Image (cartoon, rainbow, N blue to C red):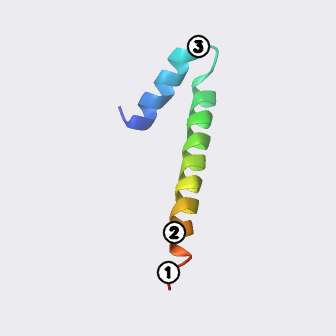
Amino acid sequence: MTAFDTKVEELIAKHPHLTKDEAIKIVTEKNNRKKQKRNERSNKGNVNKG
C-alpha cells in the first residue's frame, strides 16, 4: 500500500461513517492545501533574491 492508501484507511478507521470516496476526497484536498502552503513558503524566501 502507498502512503496515500494508508492515510485513507486510517481516516476510514477513525470515522467509520465515511465512504472510501469521501475519505479519498478529504485526503486529496488536504494534500493540495499542504502543497499550496509549501509553495507559498518557498516563494516567500525567493522574493528578496535577484
Q: Residues within 10 Å of mark 3 (few under 14, many from 20)?
A: few
* Residue at 39% over, 36% down: 3
- At a point 52% along the width and 56% down the height, the residue shown is 38
Residue highlighted by disc 2: 45
Dividing the image into 4 quarters, which one contains the N terminus? top left
The x and y percentages for residue 47 are 56, 76
Q: Do the numbered discs 3 and 2 sit on residues whose CB atoms are within 8 Å?
A: no
* Residue 6 position by quadrant: top left
Residue at the image point whose x is 58% and y is 54% from the top:
37
Q: Which residue is mark 3?
A: 16
Q: Residues within 10 Å of mark 1 (few under 14, many from 20)?
A: few
Under circle 1, the secondary element is loop
Position of residue 24 in the picture relative to residue 3 (left or right)? right
Question: Residue at coordinates 59% horizontally, 16% vertically from top-left?
Answer: 15
Identify the image quadrant of residue 39: bottom right
Q: Which amino acid type is marked by label 2?
A: Gly
Kindly identify the amino acid type of the residue bearing the numbered disc 1. Lys
- The answer to the question of whether label 1 and label 3 lie on touching residues, with beta carbons closer than 8 A, is no
> Percent from the top left, x then y, of residue 46?
51, 74
Q: In front of the other: label 3 or label 2?
A: 2
> How far apart in space, not on screen, are marks 3 and 2 (Cα)?
41 Å
Q: Earlier in the sequence, mark 1 or mark 3?
A: 3
**Residue 28: quadrant of the picture:** top right
Q: Are marks 2 and 1 in contact (CB under 8 Å)?
A: yes
Q: Distance between the Cα atoms at labels 2 and 1? A: 8 Å
Residue 36 position in % (x across, y down): 59, 55
What residue is shown with label 1?
49
Does dot 2 land on a helix, a strand or a loop? helix
Instruction: Please give left or right for residue 40 compared with residue 6 in the image.
Output: right
